[in-house]
Image: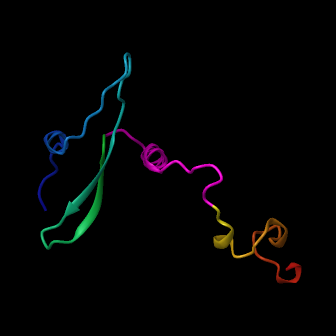
Amino acid sequence: MTDPQPLGRLIDSLGVEHRPEEGELVLGAVVLMKVMEADGRISMRSAWSPGLSWMERVGMHQAAAQTDLPVRPSGQWDTRELDSGVSVESVDGDGWDDPDQR
């Protein structure tokens, strides 16, 4: 294993950019990386700026995931066939199906 190295040049070589708004100050970063290992396997890695707590890192991952999800067109994605007939009335208070109410 090699020593840790700054990611600046690597990120720059991949074409990753951010254009800060007027007055914006970047306080931290989480970097997600798709890596091809020496044996050809593909894996995911992450790195983050010092000082970020685990909660901030998880929150940043979640915010990034939400930002990247496609917009769901209103009324165009019908999930009834996925719900397999389970309705709100057929689920009891603890979230388990009650077969007697079907």
In the image: residue 30, left or right of residue 73: left
Q: Which colouring convention does the figure follow?
A: rainbow
Q: How many marks?
A: 0
Q: Nearer the viewer, residue 47 or 34?
A: 34
In which image quadrant can residue 16 be found? top left
Name the quarter where the C terminus is drawn: bottom right
Q: Position of residue 60 (x, y in %)?
A: 44, 44
Q: Residue furthest bottom?
A: 100
In which image quadrant can residue 76 be found? bottom right
Assess whether residue 25 is covered by the magenta stretch.
Answer: no
Q: Position of residue 89 (x, y in %)?
A: 85, 68
Q: Position of residue 80 (x, y in %)?
A: 69, 68
Q: Nearer the viewer, residue 54 or 40?
A: 40
Query: Which residue is at 12% across, 69% downward?
Result: 38
Name the quarter where the N terminus is drawn: bottom left
Assess whether residue 63 is covered by the magenta stretch.
Answer: yes
Q: Is residue 74 above or below residue 82?
A: above
Q: Position of residue 68 (x, y in %)?
A: 43, 48
In which image quadrant can residue 45 be found? bottom left
In the image: residue 71, left or right of residue 53: right
Query: Which residue is at 77% across, 76% downward?
Result: 97
Q: Residue furthest front?
A: 76
> What is the magenta range?
50-77
Query: Which residue is at 88% across, 78% downward?
Result: 101
Q: Residue furthest right?
A: 101
